[in-house]
Amino acid sequence: MHEIKATLFRVLGHPARVRILELLRDGERSVGSLQAELGMGEGSTSQHLAALRRIAPKFDVLIANFRP
């Protein structure tokens, strides 16, 4: 159980990932809108989203599969 908690805190240890969760709190967002809000490129945003998916496989439900 300690390993699971440690992994969770490690993933949430980056401010961009916490911001992504805040942005998704109200519902689905496109990847493009997340990129614009975070001021990050596609590669960086994708890495952060991948890290969040590793701890919550259902995370994809919150991200629309389209670009604006």
Image (cartoon, grey):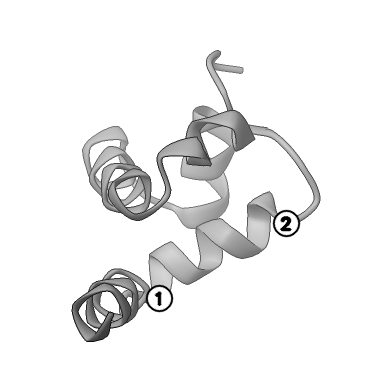
Q: Is residue 48 above or below residue 36?
A: below
Q: Position of residue 56 (x, y in %)?
A: 42, 49
Q: Which of marks 2 and 1 is nearer the N terminus?
A: 1
Residue at horizontal 36 percent and vertical 52 percent from the top: 52
Q: What residue type is labelled 1?
A: Pro
| Mark sitting on residue 25 | 2
- Does residue 14 appear left or right of residue 30 in this picture? left
- Does residue 53 appear left or right of residue 51 in this picture? right
- Does residue 54 appear left or right of residue 17 in this picture? left
Q: Where is residue 27 in the image (x, y as percent from the top left)?
A: 76, 42
Q: Relative to the observer, which residue lies in front, 3 or 51?
A: 3
Task: Report helix, strand or loop for mark 1.
Answer: helix
Q: Is residue 19 above or below residue 9?
A: above
- The answer to whether marks 2 and 1 mark residues whose Cβ atoms lie closer than 8 Å is no
Mark pair 2, 1: CA separation: 15 Å
| Mark sitting on residue 15 | 1
Q: Where is residue 51 in the image (x, y as percent from the top left)?
A: 27, 52
